[in-house]
Amino acid sequence: MSLSAVLSADAPSPTPSESQTPRVPSLQDAQETAGNAAGWVEENWSTWLAIGLRVLLIVVIAAVLRVMVRRAITKLIDRMSRTGQSMDGGALGGLLVNAERRRQRSQAIGSVLRSVASFLILGTAALMVLGTFQINLAPLLASAGVAGVAIGFGARNLVTDFLSGVFMILEDQYGVGDTIDAGVASGEVIEVGLRVTKLRGDSGEIWYVRNGEVKRIGNLSQGWATANVDVTVRADEDLDRVRATLGEVAEKMGKEEPWNELLWGPIEVLGLDSVLLDSMVMRVSGKTMPGKSLTVERELRWRVKRAFDAAGIRIVGGATAAEDLEASAPDPAAGVAPPSAYASTASPQSVAASPLPPSNITK
């Protein structure tokens, strides 16, 4: 008999019931497991309690500090807004700085400051909580630093646009409804963002201008505008009569509605702007509301033309003045008769008009 046969005969064969039936833990096993758990809790409860209290304290302090900082920022912005309103005492100040625009700018500044404060406070609290759980923050901070440097190099234009937008809002360089010249584009501002400013062009197109690309801004809607009209008349016109006619037009326009509301001062006749051989230029100027200078200039030209036509004053300029001068100059050849075709004996007219020679009649 072989060894394998002996071993197989001595070893008991497993029954199907023993292999499929799970082992039921006894009461002694349960008591032993509960004792081990109680011992582990007894050994570590003080540590976990201290960690929990520390985390709770960090969260409470961060929440309270965030609320206090946000309220302080809100009160500071409201105080700055009220101070700006009290400084604008006159009507001119009220027109220069709109109350609604100041309120919108204050809300934008307050929102940016509150977001930055919340990010700093909550970020610091999160790092302190991780440190409480004895998590090594050095690799995390190193990875965040490397990622920040990479993102900074890749998104430097985005950071530049964001910072430029913040300073534009803080300094109130322009607002919604202003007409500006941003260098790369010009038009009416329809939206001001921290990264992009939207402009509506003269033809209706919308320009998306990145705040970081704007190097200089010309705001045409702050303060006042100037309406300048140059009137070119003949050099032989009476200057006193021209000046008096322009003064009457300016005075009448300044008293009529709605031009008296658009004008911020009387229209002045500044005098001779230039004197040429065949013409001279008179300049008329006046201060208007922002963005209304072109409207005032068109109306002023209309009135000046009608007044000059009624007074018999000719308006000239450019090629028209040269044509008028040539038309008014006497023609030296006007009194000389044109040469006659009969003056030359060889001309066809002379030959045709010469009498025929008498013919010889022979019998």
Image (spheres, grey):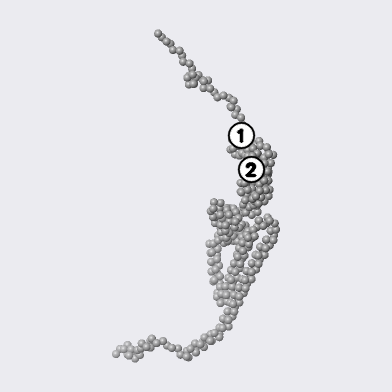
Q: Which residue is mark 2?
A: 304
In the depicted view, which residue is nearer to us: 204 or 165? 204
Name the residue type under label 1. Leu
Quadrant into which the C terminus falls = top left
Q: Residue at x 57, y 57 (%)?
A: 190
Name the residue type under label 2. Val
Say whether residue 296 is left or right of residue 154.
Answer: right
State which mark lies toward you, 2 or 1: 2
The label on residue 325 is 1
Q: Position of residue 341 (x, y in %)?
A: 51, 22
Q: Residue at x 63, y 36 (%)?
A: 278
How far is disc 2 from disc 1 in space, using C-alphas? 23 Å
For marks 2 and 1, the one nearer the N-term is 2
Q: Position of residue 274 (x, y in %)?
A: 65, 41
- Is the residue 338 above or below the residue 358 in the image? below
Residue 286 in view (yes/no):
no
Q: Position of residue 43 (x, y in %)?
A: 55, 85
In the depicted view, which residue is nearer to us: 21 or 169? 169
Is the residue marked by circle 1 packed among few (<14), some (14-19), or many (20+) residues within 10 Å?
some
Say whether residue 282 is left or right of residue 10.
Answer: right
Q: Residue at x 62, y 73 (%)?
A: 64
User: Do labels 2 and 1 touch, CB within 8 Å?
Assistant: no
Quadrant into which the N terminus falls = bottom left
Q: Residue at x 63, y 60 (%)?
A: 100
The answer to which image quadrant residue 277 occupies is: top right
In the depicted view, which residue is nearer to us: 84 or 56? 84
Q: Secondary structure at mark 1?
A: helix
